[in-house]
Every structure is written in C-alpha cells, then in structure tokens.
Image: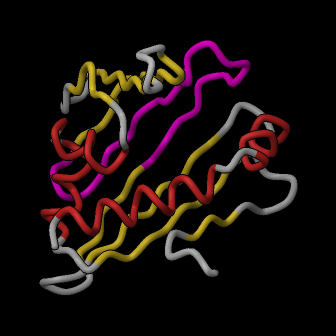
C-alpha cells in the first residue's frame, strides 16, 4: 500500500522532506497543527503545552493504557505565520536523539485542498538514518489520515 504522506530522504544528507496533500482548506490544516484539542485527536497524544508564537514552546506526552508515560517530546517555536509556516525545534525526551529543526510550510492549493511540506534537519546523517529505521513513515501516515477524517 502506498502512503499519502511522502517522505523523501536523499542518501548522505542530514535532512528529510515530508509532503502531504489534504482534502482540507489550508485554514483547517493549519488549525490541526495549532489547536491543542485537535492535535490530541490526530496525534493520539496529550498536549501539555502549546504556545503558538515566536519563542513559545510545546510539549506532548503519550501514555500506555496503564498510565505510564511512553513518549514525551518538546520544542520551541521560532517562527509562527498563521496559515503559512511554523519553524520549531523538536526533541524526543529520554532518547539518544538530539534536537532537530522542523520547517513546516502550509500551502493553499484550492479553496478545499491544501498541502503541508515539512523540512526536517537532523544533527547528523547517522541520526537521520536511525530515525528513518523507526516505524516513522507508517505512524505519520496513520496520524495524517486521522487528521483528515476529523474534519469530514
């Protein structure tokens, strides 16, 4: 099965590009990334903090059915242009992965369709390659599918 969310990773580079077209207006796509209640639905995680402005921060946390925290991530928002772009750092806590930087760009294709492009830069090619070995593509595709269904 081919994923709708595409990940392009060129050999020998410490970056990836993630793209996805949605049957959603750009306003709703942007809202899905910036409103805590919606983020929680499609990412299946708890939003502990989401400050959508330059120098704001965010923190997400996922627990297992027994209540133990199994994933926590945080970052700082560096640039925030409504319905256009977000530049932020991202770090998974309690893992060997160092902080990465994400450049999210939101694009209006038509009145009812939009596209997100995420350019992620890792500290090294090795860290990028390690990340790509995780079930990263499958998880992101499933999350993006949930995102699209929220607004249907």
Answer above or below: position of 42 versus 89. Answer: below
**Residue 78 pos. (x, y %):** 34, 30
Residue at 47% x, 60% y is: 142
Left or right: 11 as drawn, with respect to 75 = right
**Residue 63 pos. (x, y %):** 43, 23
Answer above or below: position of 52 versus 35. Answer: above
**In the image shown, does 46 or 99 lie closer to the viewer?**
46
Residue at 44% x, 47% y is: 103
Left or right: 4 as drawn, with respect to 34 = right
Question: In the image, which residues are magenta?
Answer: 81-103
Residue at 38% x, 40% y is: 87
Does the magenta portion include 59? no
Left or right: 140 as drawn, with respect to 131 = left
Work out which residue is located at the far bottom of the displayed protein and give it: 110
**Residue 18 pos. (x, y %):** 54, 61
Answer above or below: position of 106 versus 44. Answer: below
Residue at 59% x, 60% y is: 17
């Amino acid at each position: 099965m081919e994923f709708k969310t595409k990940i392009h990773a060129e050999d020998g580079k410490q970056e990836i590009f993630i793209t996805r077209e949605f049957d959603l207006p750009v306003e709703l796509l942007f809202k899905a990334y910036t409103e805590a209640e919606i983020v929680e639905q499609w990412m299946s995680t708890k939003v502990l903090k989401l400050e959508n402005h330059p120098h704001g921060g965010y923190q997400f946390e996922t627990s297992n059915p027994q209540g133990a925290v199994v994933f926590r991530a945080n970052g700082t928002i560096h640039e925030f242009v409504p319905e256009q772009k977000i530049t932020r750092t991202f770090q998974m806590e309690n893992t060997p992965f160092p902080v990465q930087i994400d450049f999210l760009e939101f694009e209006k294709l038509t009145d009812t369709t939009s596209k997100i492009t995420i350019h992620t830069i890792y500290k090294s090619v090795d860290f990028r390659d390690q990340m790509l070995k995780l079930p990263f593509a499958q998880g992101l595709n499933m999350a993006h599918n949930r995102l699209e269904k929220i607004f249907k």
